Amino acid sequence: MKRKTLAYLLTSLLLTALAAHATAAQQEARRAEKSSKKTISISGIVGSEGRFLVSDKGNRVWKVLNPELLTACSGQRVNVKVQANVETSEITIRIVRLREERTTAKLDDAAFRR
């Protein structure tokens, strides 16, 4: 009788410890996922086939996880809003805006006000 009671207590204690450990691991994974994915805006030049984006600030290279949104913009300057994983330098594109390059003089410049 004592062996059955002892085995029952030991088994229940082991199951309780395993459940607590699994819950703690899930909470840690959720925290890591929330902290590593941040919504940010990046401006830069799109790499070949939209697979990479080189940012204007610091020339940081970002790997694009959904390059189909940037394939039409290869080699062009863009502003993008992304979900970024800063630790692995991976981004998921949310919004893409092409940046206009000024090729003519700015007529409201001080040099033209005479």
Image (cartoon, rainbow, N blue to C red):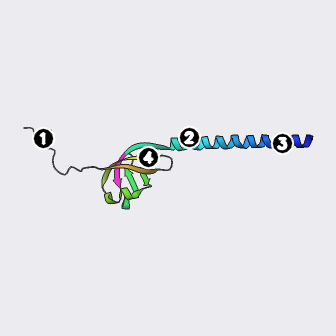
For label 3, the SS is helix
To which residue does mark 1 refer? 111
**Numbered disc in front, either 3 or 4:** 3
To which residue does mark 2 refer? 31
Label 4 packing within 10 angstroms: few (<14), some (14-19), many (20+): some
To which residue does mark 3 refer? 8
**Numbered disc in front, either 1 or 4:** 4
- Magenta region: 42-46
- The residue that appears at 55% across and 43% down in the rendered structure is 32
Image coords of residue 24 (percent x, y): 65, 40
Could you tell me how far apart the alpha carbons at marks 3 and 1 are, in whole angstroms? 90 Å
Label 1 packing within 10 angstroms: few (<14), some (14-19), many (20+): few
Q: Is residue 56 visible?
A: no
- The residue that appears at 42% across and 56% down in the rendered structure is 66
Check whether the beta carbons of the residues at disc 4 and disc 2 lie within 8 A of each other: no
Label 3 packing within 10 angstroms: few (<14), some (14-19), many (20+): few
Label 2 packing within 10 angstroms: few (<14), some (14-19), many (20+): few
To which residue does mark 4 refer? 83
Q: Which of disc 1 and disc 3 is earlier in sequence?
A: 3
Image coords of residue 16 (percent x, y): 74, 40
Q: Which residue is the extreme one toward the right?
A: 1
Nearer to us in this view, 6 or 86? 6
Q: Which of disc 2 and disc 4 is earlier in sequence?
A: 2
* Amino acid residing under circle 2: Arg
For label 1, the SS is helix
For label 4, the SS is strand
